Image (spheres, grey):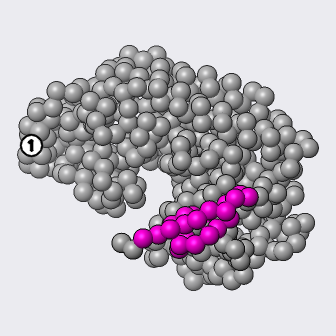
Amino acid sequence: MAVEKTMKTIGARSFWLFLLLSMAISAARAVNYSGTLPVVFINTASAINSKTDYVSATFHLDPMGIEGYEAIGSADDPFPLEIRGRGNYTWYGPFEKKSYKIKLESGLPLLGMGRNKHFALLAHADGGQTAFFRNTAGFELGRMVGLEFTPQQRPVELVLNGDYRGLYFLTETVRVGQRRVNITEQENRETAPELITGGWLVEIDNVNESWHQVIPPRTGTELTRFRVTYHSPDTLSTAQYQYLYNQMTDMLRAVYTADKNSTEWEQFIDLDALARYYFVNEILDHVEAFLGSCYLYKDRGKSAWKFGPLWDLGHAFNGWHPKNRFLYQYKHESREDWDICIMEEFAKFPKLQARVRELWAQFAPTLYPTLTTYLQNFATEIAQAAVCDHERWPDYGTADVNGALDYCLNLLEQKRQFLEEQWNEGSIGIENIVEKPFEKAVFDLQGRRYNNDFQLSSGIYLKGRKKILIRKTAK
């Protein structure tokens, strides 16, 4: 029965040829799954070479006897699905361990998550020892602070065409739906004025996909780049494009007003949703927040956009950004080409500052011990699978999960101490620290400021209260 079902789904000849080749390749590898996590088995009709074109496949899911999880199909009776690559840097970058997007033939409640056809298998190959903890911590914080929708994920092990591919995270994708971003779904190419007000699902993006993006004017702001990728609807009429363009343009104008007591920006941005979304990202010092993978959504008939859901916290638990800084200050301190972050302007509004402090007073006493316990249990859950994963992919991840956990918790504690100083009642607040000189800032004798030594030519400069001499030799 399984052979007939598989052959009908992906074609008999191509299936057998591809399966034999895959088995030959995987036979050379001794690494196998740990069996301590559910295992997803996928067999494809051909190689997965694209992040846009799906490949036909079949799958089954073995929970490995873990209580509370149910099997989906079996080796003898698999289910059909489609699979393609996913990601930008992680797909096109130098990573052999790839992430995938899967689309089931019909909605299934995989590993206790909401019934749906759309999931991702995230590899997290790009984050070193902290890779497995970033989304895990962020998603849990999102649920703790009450964001409307935060993706669920489950750690699994993946076997693709007989080849053990390591530790993955089966994850709910961000999309419009009753169990995901629960807003009215707008039709593609809609023209009726009363219908194009929602629902919208868009993303502040740091990837140039101009055919799917709106780029509003930024005159009079510090923003060097502000791209908005539209996901739903994904094909726009002229009326829809103009509506989205006007919304983003008017929002930027309202946010970058000189009058920070103005409330006009709240016509475009839901203050509470922004505060909660920012709160999570700041706790984790996710310096890419508000620059990329930053979603907003808007329901029909609603005036304000809501920030969220959380997705791809790829620069959380970073060890390079000083933990006595806010996330939106990273651009001032790095030699990397990071763009100006709109959160820096949001942070100047007293009403947002007040709401963030309220959230801190409400959640901080229990948030940190609860999150610590959650991450400790998670580390125990994935420990053996992480060892197998590291044997399979020695350049990615870590076999020392407990060491990685200690590293993450140490960064979390450093940031907590800083936020406690800033956000407790009577503190200086998030608006004033922006004006403080950074430790790395250097001034010339005319008072011009330089944020990085590489900008300097030979000469005498002031750093802190001391004079320093810079000598640069010709290369």
Describe residue 40's horizontal placement relative to residue 332 as left or right.
left
Residue at screen point 19% across, 48% down:
45
Percent coordinates x, y for residue 99 in the rendering: 36, 47
Percent coordinates x, y for residue 246 in the rendering: 68, 79
| Magenta stretch contains residue 454 | yes
Question: From this viewpoint, is residue 111 visible?
Answer: no
Q: Could you say which quadrant of the image residue 283 lies in?
A: top right
447 or 195, nearer to the observer: 447
Residue at screen point 24% across, 39% down:
160
Image: 41 above or below 239: above
Percent coordinates x, y for residue 352 in the rendering: 82, 55
Mark 1 is surrounded, within 10 Å at the Cα level, by few (under 14), some (14 to 19) or many (20 or more) other residues, namely few
Q: Could you say which quadrant of the image residue 290 lies in?
A: bottom right
Image: 238 above or below 255: below
Q: Could you say which quadrant of the image residue 316 lies in?
A: top right
> How many numbered marks does the figure carry?
1
Which residue position is annotated with label 1? 21
Residue at screen point 30% across, 26% down:
388
Question: From this viewpoint, is residue 25 visible?
Answer: yes
50 or 331, nearer to the observer: 331
Image: 248 above or below 177: below
| Magenta stretch contains residue 172 | no
35 or 282, nearer to the observer: 282
Q: Which residues are magenta?
A: 451-473
Residue at screen point 23% across, 26% down:
32
Describe residue 471's horizontal placement relative to residue 58 as left or right.
right
Image: 6 above or below 452: above
Percent coordinates x, y for residue 53 in the rendering: 30, 60
Q: Is label 1 in a helix, a strand or a loop?
A: helix
Q: Disc 1 marks which amino acid?
A: Leu
State the quadrant of the C terminus.
bottom left
State the quadrant of the N terminus.
top left
